[in-house]
Image: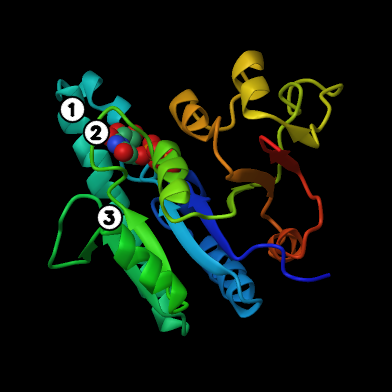
Amino acid sequence: MENQYHRILLKISGEALKGHSDIYDSEFLEKIYDIVSRIQKMGTEVAIVVGGGNIWRGNMASSLGIEHTIGDYMGMMATVMNAMCLQSYFENHGLVTRVMSAIPVNQCCEPYIRRKAIRHLEKKRVVIFAGGIGSPFFTTDTTAALRAKEICADGIFMGKNGVEGIYTDDPRKNPDAKLIKKISYQDILAKGLKIMDNTAVGLLVDSEVDVRVFNMNDPENAVRVVKGEELGTLVTNK
Ligand code: UDP
């Protein structure tokens, strides 16, 4: 089977980066490097949106008496740290990367400029988007949806840890929960399924970008998806 994706956007949550450690799980870093390098070798361009929840989430602010908006900016700064971590790990193992932040931190990384991001991807650099969308009251899921549209990605890969995709109910609580193979964005909203927040789904509702949700525990799965195997759940308008 041939490579089915020209350009993908991979969403990595802070939770995944944390794994079983305090902030960064070395096993996860190794796994994600393995996945990205294998996909790239197949000729697929890879962009990444990284979350920040392993360090800080905006909703942790209120109980500490910190203003919500400040809490959100702290969350965005956390994603910059995570992007730098990924960059350094990837480059130490031989991948060429660029970090582009929506909040300028010019000593550490490039500012986000859409056309430059596309140029980096064309040159087969892994582009890591940091700083969310640069505005409070949003999430990195929304960032993934927005950047995927901006860079004309064919798909967003949402890797899950030990879960095969989207189910009719929580499979850990309901043994009758069934894996959904294909679903539209409209149905995700109508059924209140929690895969990305509603702002992110709303951005994708009329787009060409598909989301593939699959179990990333086995790095081979990402390769299989790139080859066109129908693993997990496909969220699409088509
Ligand atoms: N955030 C924000 N605007 C954005 C993206 C993120 O304000 O465009 C803040 C928000 O407080 C969020 C935190 O950054 O809680 C970390 O991002 P997120 O929770 O999406 O990370 P993940 O759940 O993927 O680890």
Packing grade of label 2 (10 A; few <14, some 14-19, many >=20) is many
Packing grade of label 3 (10 A; few <14, some 14-19, many >=20) is many
Name the residue at 24% across, 33% down. Answer: 72
Residue at image mark 2: 72
Whichever of labels 2 and 3 marks the residue nearer the N terminus, that label is 2
The reply to whether discs 3 and 1 touch (Cβ–Cβ < 8 Å) is no
* Helix, strand or loop at mark 1: helix
Q: Nearer the viewer, residue 134 or 32?
A: 134
How far is disc 2 from disc 3 in space, using C-alphas?
Answer: 13 Å
The location of residue 47, given as percent across then percent down, is 46, 61
The reply to whether discs 2 and 3 touch (Cβ–Cβ < 8 Å) is no
Is residue 221 in sight in this rendering? yes
Residue at image mark 3: 80
Which quadrant does ligand 1 occupy? top left
Indicate left or right for 122 with 113 as reference: right
Note whether ligand 1 is within 8 Å of mark 1: no
Kind of residue sitting beneath label 1: Thr
How far is disc 3 from disc 1 in space, using C-alphas?
Answer: 17 Å
How far is disc 2 from disc 1 in space, using C-alphas?
Answer: 5 Å
Name the residue at 67% across, 21% down. Answer: 187
> Which quadrant: the C terminus?
top right
The location of residue 44, given as percent across then percent down, is 60, 70
Packing grade of label 1 (10 A; few <14, some 14-19, many >=20) is some
Note whether ligand 1 is within 8 Å of mark 2: yes
Give the image's coloring scheme. Answer: rainbow
Residue at image mark 1: 69
* Helix, strand or loop at mark 3: helix
Kind of residue sitting beneath label 3: Val
